[in-house]
Structure formats: structure tokens, C-alpha cells
């Protein structure tokens, strides 16, 4: 569904049918996270992560923290792999173990390596 910021995100939900006014973010939140507001979608990195990495094993958790004096809010995303049960250092790239197991990705990397050698 499209967020108030105009990005596509599978965790955002809104319902305005027959007088309802429901807007919510359904991503799991950290236990010390501040409550979500629709304005948070403008700075949220989750839609970009989902666009870069479509792994079904990627689990994301969002923590919203107010900044100094409460004038802004920071978004912190923690990623982990459901399959290997490890934290993912870069959610845009995905789980390193899952990437090693994908044969097509390995062939692609080898082809890139060979084409770089032939250019020299």
C-alpha cells in the first residue's frame, strides 16, 4: 500500500471505507519505540529496504526514537534472517549466508569478475 510519503510499503495500512479513519504501520516495533505517526513515513528507510531486498527470510524491526528536545525522530531498523537466525548487518544487501547459497547470484558475480579481467 502507498504510504502518506508516496512510497510503496507492505507494512503500511490505511482504511477510509464508510467513515473509518485508520492509519497504521504494522511492522514489528522495538520494545522502547515511540508510538508511530503518519509523518514518520517520510523518513522511514523500510520501503527502500523492501525495494532493494525482496528476501522472504528477512525480518525487520523498527525502533522510533525522539531526538534531542523532542523536535525530531530517528528511525532505526534492525534486520535478521529467519532461515539462519542471525542478525543482518546491511538489510539492503540481505543475509550473507542466504546470498552464498543462491547459485544464480554466484554465477552473476563470477561473470562480472570475468568481464572486469577482459577490460584490462
Image (tube, grey):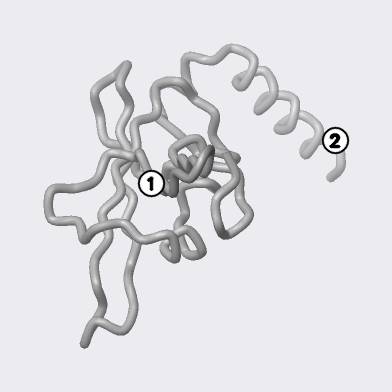
Residue most extreme to the bottom: 69
The residue at 13%/55% (across/down) is 32
Asked where in the image residue 28 lies, by quadrant, the reply is top left
How many numbered badges does the structure rendering display?
Answer: 2
Q: Residue visible at 43% across and 42% down?
A: 91
Residue 86 placement (x, y as % from top left): 25, 29
The residue identified by callout 1 is 24
Is 88 in front, or is 8? 8
Q: Residues within 10 Å of mark 2 (few under 14, many from 20)?
A: few
Quadrant holding the C terminus:
top right
Of 109 and 74, the residue lying toward us: 74
Mark 2 lies on a secondary structure that is helix
Q: Which residue is mark 2?
A: 118
Q: Badge 1: few (under 14), some or many (20 or more) residues near its Cα, within 10 Å?
A: some
27 shown above or below 33: above
Look at 54% across and 29% down and name the residue there. 54
Q: Is residue 70 left or right of residue 111?
A: left
Mark nearer the viewer, 2 or 1: 1
Determine the image quadrant of residue 97: top left
Q: CA distance from mark 2 to mark 1?
A: 52 Å
Vertical comparison of 4 with 88: above or below: below
Extreme residue toward the right, this view:
119
Q: How far across and down, in percent of the image, does residue 101 sit?
A: 47, 14
* Label 1 SS: strand
Q: Earlier in the sequence, mark 2 or mark 1?
A: 1
Indicate whether 54 appears above or below 3: above
Amino acid at each position: 500500500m502507498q504510504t502518506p510519503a508516496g512510497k510503496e510499503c507492505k507494512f503500511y495500512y490505511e482504511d477510509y471505507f464508510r467513515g473509518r479513519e485508520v492509519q497504521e504501520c504494522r511492522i514489528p516495533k522495538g520494545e522502547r519505540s515511540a508510538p508511530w505517526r503518519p509523518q514518520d513515513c517520510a523518513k522511514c528507510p523500510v520501503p527502500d529496504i523492501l525495494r532493494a531486498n525482496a528476501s522472504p527470510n528477512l525480518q525487520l524491526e523498527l525502533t522510533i526514537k525522539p531526538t534531542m528536545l523532542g523536535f525530531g525522530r530517528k528511525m532505526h531498523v534492525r534486520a535478521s534472517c529467519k532461515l539462519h537466525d542471525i542478525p543482518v548487518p546491511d538489510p539492503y544487501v540481505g543475509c550473507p549466508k542466504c546470498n552464498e547459497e543462491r547459485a544464480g547470484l554466484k554465477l552473476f558475480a563470477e561473470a562480472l569478475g570475468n568481464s572486469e579481467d577482459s577490460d584490462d
